[in-house]
Image (cartoon, helix red, strand yellow):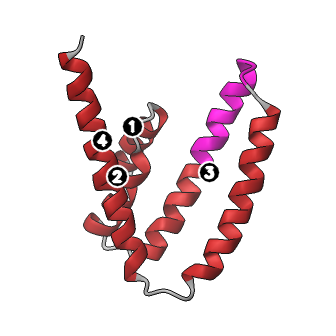
Amino acid sequence: MSYIIPFLISLLMGMGVGGAGLFIIYLTSFLGTPQAMAQGTNLVFFVISAISALIIHLKKRKFYPVQVVTIVIFGVLGSYIFSHFSNMIDPDIPRRVLGGILIFGGGVSVFLAIKSFFHS
């Protein structure tokens, strides 16, 4: 079972459903993984998925160097800044913020789905 759930979550991530949040919930709630370790595991999981997606985008020639370089620069800067910032705050805060973001994002998705259903 520990191979089936991550596989299903990776399928959802590949379809753009937002499997990263599901993977963290799975790791923390069902496997009892500490929050920081779950986020690190999720990051590795995401990088592997992103590499697979990059290969497909390169084959389909859907690669935009300017956007990629911009995203990489800001991603590295943001990671560096916030990794130092995270050492100064209570470890429970990122867990709560992530939960809030997931709830908000899910609510927006449901709202947009209902709106598009009634306006179709």
**Marks 3 and 2, how far apart in space?**
16 Å
Q: Classify 26 as above or below 16.
A: below
Residue assigned mark 4: 108
What residue sits right under mark 2 in the picture?
22
Q: Are marks 3 and 2 in contact (CB under 8 Å)?
A: no
Pointers 2 and 1 in contact (CB under 8 A)? yes
Circle 1 Cα neighbour tier, 10 Å, few/some/many (<14 / 14–19 / ≥20): some
Please state which amino acid type lies under the numbered disc 1: Val
Picture coordinates of residue 6 (x, y %)? Answer: 40, 49
**Tag 3, which secondary structure?**
helix
Q: Which badge, 4 or 2, comes first in the chain's sequence?
A: 2
Q: Main secondary structure of the magenta part?
A: helix
Q: Position of residue 27 (x, y in %)?
A: 36, 64
Check if mark 4's residue and mark 2's residue have beta carbons within 8 Å. no
Residue at disc 1, secondary structure: loop
Residue at image position (77%, 46%) is: 70
Q: Report the span colored magenta.
A: 48-62
98 over 57 or under it: above or below: below
Image quadrant in which you'd find residue 66? top right
| N-term mark: 4 or 1 | 1
Q: Identify which residue is drawn at 44% across, 68% down.
A: 38
Residue type (three-letter) at the residue carrying disc 4: Val
Residue 50 visible, this angle: yes
Q: Position of residue 7 (x, y in %)?
A: 41, 43
